[in-house]
Image: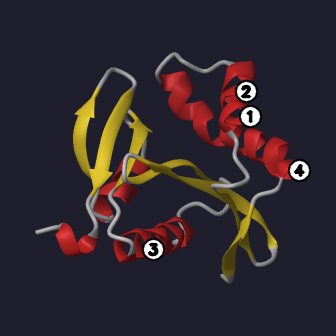
Amino acid sequence: MEWGLRSAEAADVEAIAELRAAVMRPDLERLGRFDEHRVRQRLRDSFSTRYTSVIEADGAFAGCVTMRPVDGGLWLEHFYLAPGIQGRGLGSAVLRALLDRSDAAGQAVRLHVLQGSAARRLYERHGFTVEGQDPIDVHMARQPAKQRI
């Protein structure tokens, strides 16, 4: 599968909000936290064309990812892939490319993943470790490759 990243545009927000709702629904329902409106509005409220990239695979919209600078490192959020594309290595390829950039810049990457989410295994395979957790989120971080032991 050929893939690439392009800068998000304001016109992408609704497609990304819908993708977020579809991808997060099972985990949010399992946690008793799914709300049809809120799941979309949280994306709209934090959407940034400056830090968000659209993932395209074989020329079509496949997902998105946001990497925001924060506290001398990066915050990874809104990393969603269309359900029909998941499990085919695209998430790992995109994450590897983003982490190569953060390693080159010497920046740590932090994120939250929902408790029980299969995405946690993806992050652990790429060097993220648990920093803490609460009943809803697992807080994870990854130090730059040259700083990891």
In the image, taking residue 13 as reference, residue 79 lies left or right, namely: left
Which kind of residue does numbered mark 3 sit on? Arg
Which residue is nearer to you in this view: 67 or 122?
67
Chain-order first, disc 1 or disc 4? 4
* Residue at the (30%, 63%) spot, across then down: 125
Residue ID for mark 3? 101
SS at circle 4: helix
Q: CA distance from mark 1 to mark 4?
A: 11 Å
Residue ID for mark 4? 11
Residue 8 point in image, percent of width and height: 76, 58
Chain-order first, disc 4 or disc 2? 4
Residue ID for mark 1? 44
Q: In this rendering, which labeled residue sits more in front, label 2 or label 3?
A: 3
- Cβ atoms under marks 2 and 1 closer than 8 Å: yes
Q: Residue furthest front?
A: 72
* Residue at the (43%, 50%) spot, across then down: 119
Chain-order first, disc 1 or disc 3? 1
